[in-house]
Image (spheres, helix red, strand yellow):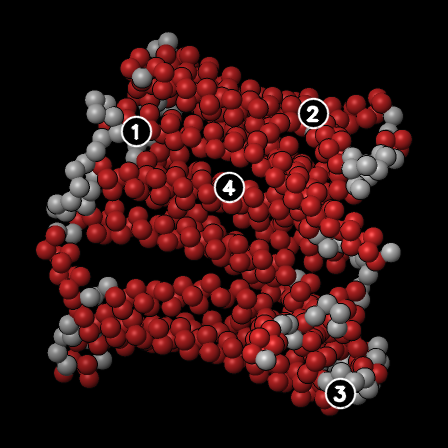
Amino acid sequence: MAENVRDASESTQPAGLRRFLSVGGCLPLAVLVALVLLAFVNAVTYVRPPSWIDDVAEWRLSGRLLVSFWVVAGLQLIATWILGLSGAIAGAQAHNETGDLGRRLRRAQWRLVAAALGVLALRLLLLIVVLTAVGLVAGHVFNPTIDGWLASRLLQLSRRYAWLGLASAAVIGLHLLIGPFLRTRYSVALGLWAAARARNDEERAWAAASARLMAGFAGVFGLLWGGATIVLVWASLTDPILDWHGLPTPYFLPSAPDPLSTILGVMLVTALISGCITAGQIVLPPLFRALAMRRLRAADAGAESDV
Amino acid sequence: MASTTSKRFLQRPAWARPEHPVFWLESNRNGRSAVLSLMRFGCLPLILAVGGLVAMGVGTLAFVQEAAYNVENAFMTSLAATVGALLIVQVVAGAAANILMVAQAAPLISGEVELQSWGLLRTTTLTLREIVMAKLWAVLNQLRGSLLGLMALRAASTGTALLFLMYLLLRDILYYMSQARWVETLQEQIWTPPTVAALVFLAWYLVQPVLQFVLNGAVGMAASTFARSRGRAIAIALATRLVLWVSSIIVNVGLIYLLGFLLIANWSQPQYAPIEWFTQFSQPSDQAISFVLSGTAILYIMFVALLQVGLLAAALTITQRRARRLGG
């Protein structure tokens, strides 16, 4: 019944230009805020070098690159978090609208396109900072000030295990780039489902926000616990308890020296986690939508039987 | 017959059902107030937001400081830092939820008395017990979001702490034990009593949010019967809760210190005991120390739990007795 009602809300939407501005404002705002913060941070940090620094230019450049990385990484994390919450509330609003459910969801997602593009812009900025740092390090600009050890191991890795490294980087990169849009889609669907489960109109937006935050909460601890458990199991296998004449010690890759296997392991695990998150963001929205539809149909059937 | 009895046992009591008149009245009393909506529905998202952001921030910062050197240590540090941060968030969120619950429960009866509707309510066919429990249940139901948030924090901190403990045991304490010492420890069963004590503590720790939640509601309602206006009832309720909180801290810290002083500083090390009477005894075995200390801890936790349940029952009894005498 809910899908077949003509959408009456289309005639009440605001005018084109104002709508475009309200929808498109997030992208330039995100970039502007990031650039202003970066400019500020680069202006106030690493100004006066300590007395033991020989090469001031390298110290300044490496320090500011590191600080810039953290600033942009933090900004994109906050923006991603806000995007998810906004998506869930938009899903609750879609529940309250009338018309075809698919159209309502698409409209809710479309309203957040600019916000998603803003998050994407921040991630691209982050990628630029990282690639700049990697390029400078690979070009031997730095001493060990900015992880020359890590950079040289990454180069070793790229020579010996090129395909594994590239595949991991591709999965991580894909998740970074399409993640904001998938996150919007997932959050809107989750918000719709949570709103459908709420008891009354007053609760719907709160229920949607709670569901999204609960999913994020579970995700944070899933990552922490999952990562910690994997490392604990690996450490127990590769470096067992002293004097315990138990299982033989397997190496991750037979010919790999330890630091390289650690870096490769971290990359592969990160790629695995990124892949799982991406898969979840693709698979779960249709499930949430189906559950919400079921709930809406049951509510409609209940209303009809009351009449 | 048996299935009817078991069904009746599993059904909600009459005062806890949505169609109960007092429950319905309390749930819909304040209409669409924005502030009340925020209190009722905003607690859960706020707690989850703060908890999630704090955990993510603290965990990430702690992780990256060591990740380049040792991933294992990085996770240990991250877990420990996250547990610490979550405990702080729990204390703050718990205090706020406690205050909210007490303040919401305090006007339940005093408000009726102030509006002169308590006498009318008492003339209905509903028993006093049903009225009191339905009112309490309504306010517990309205603030269930804060309870869910606190339970989520509790579960997260427990899981993280257990994982940290696994790291500590497997990668630190047990890591350096010889095989002979392993066998000795397992045969003497030194670890069994502390494990049981830890499980009892864990059960008590996990149940605390629910117990505190209901206790605060009961304390608020009891205070409600001591005042004839809502404002006064809230003041009495908050003061009572503060007194209970401060006195529980003093009593618990005092008891723990006393027990620790007697058992750890004196009984388990008689040759160095500050109290001379203990020096006449011989050094107890590791097994005896393990059993006695763990047993004392278990008894103490059970005592505290019983005290909390007793306070809850006392508050509800006081509420009913005083409410019976209230007029107007």
Q: Are marks 2 and 1 on the same chain?
A: yes
**Residue occupying the point 45% across, 64% down:** B205
**What is the CA distance from the residue labelled 2 to the residue labelled 1?**
39 Å
Q: Earlier in the sequence, mark 2 or mark 4?
A: 2
- SS at circle 1: helix
Q: Position of residue A251 (x, y in %)?
A: 22, 30
Picture layout, residue A298 above or below residue B132:
above
Instruction: Name the disc covering residue B326, or none.
Output: 3
Q: Are marks 3 and 4 on the same chain?
A: no
Badge 1 sits on which subunit?
A
Packing grade of label 3 (10 A; few <14, some 14-19, many >=20) is some
Q: Position of residue A299 (x, y in %)?
A: 76, 51
Picture layout, residue A213 above or below residue A256:
below
Q: Amino acid at mark 2?
A: Ala
Q: Amino acid at mark 4?
A: Gly
Q: Amino acid at mark 3?
A: Leu
Of circles 1 and 3, the one toward us is: 1
- SS at circle 2: helix
Q: Are marks 2 and 3 in contact (CB under 8 Å)?
A: no
- SS at circle 4: helix
Q: Position of residue B246 (x, y in %)?
A: 52, 72
> Which image quarter is the C terminus of chain B in?
bottom right
Q: Nearer the viewer, residue A54 or A77?
A: A77
**What is the CA distance from the residue labelled 2 to the residue labelled 4?**
25 Å
Instruction: Name the disc covering residue A286, or none.
Output: none
